[in-house]
Image: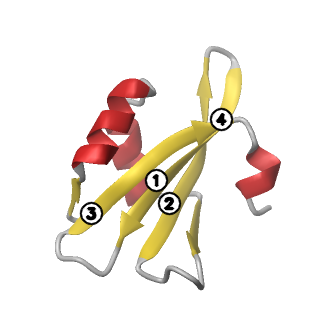
Amino acid sequence: MDYIFSKHAEEQMLRRNIDRQVVDAIVRQPEQTITDKETPDITVFQSLIRENEQTFLLRVFVNTQLCPKVIVTLYKTTKIHKYYEG
């Protein structure tokens, strides 16, 4: 999938110490994709990742209606049960 990063997404990667290669891998092969009925332009690509012996859920929000697609924002969370389906 061809995509670009919004300025906000790039800032969040730096602020949250998220590696661009990890984001790329998740966008290309996510464990899950979720589309919100209220914001159908945005699809969340998410996967579990391990850092420092801790598991996080990395969530990447992509506007899939634009060409190229735009990564709007992203974050990692320990609230896996809240967001991970399965």
**Residue 45 appears left or right of 72:** right
Callouts 2 and 4 close, C-beta under 8 Å = no
Task: For mark 1, give the secondary structure.
Answer: strand
Amino acid at the residue labelled 4: Phe
Between label 2 and label 3, give the one nearer the viewer.
3
The one nearer the camera, 43 or 23, is 43
Task: For mark 4, give the secondary structure.
Answer: strand
Disc marking residue 45:
2
**Residue 33 appears left or right of 4:** right
The residue at 17%/76% (across/down) is 67
Identify residue for label 1.
60
Q: Which quarter of the picture shows residue 50?
A: top right
The residue at 33%/45% (across/down) is 9
Give whichever of discs 2 and 4 has the lower sequence position.
Answer: 2
**Crowding at label 4, few (<14), some or many (≥20) Cα neighbours within 10 Å?**
some
Between label 4 and label 3, give the one nearer the viewer.
3
Residue 79 position within the rendered picture, expressed as x and y whole percent measured from the top left: 75, 42
Amino acid at the residue labelled 1: Val
Q: CA distance from mark 2 to mark 3?
A: 12 Å
**Crowding at label 1, few (<14), some or many (≥20) Cα neighbours within 10 Å?**
many
Quadrant where the N terminus sits is bottom left
Identify residue for label 3.
70
Give whichever of discs 2 and 1 has the lower sequence position.
Answer: 2
The residue at 57%/38% (across/down) is 76
Identify residue for label 4.
56
Amino acid at the residue labelled 2: Phe
Q: CA distance from mark 1 to mark 4?
A: 13 Å
Q: CA distance from mark 2 to mark 1?
A: 5 Å
Q: Is residue 48 above or below residue 85?
A: above
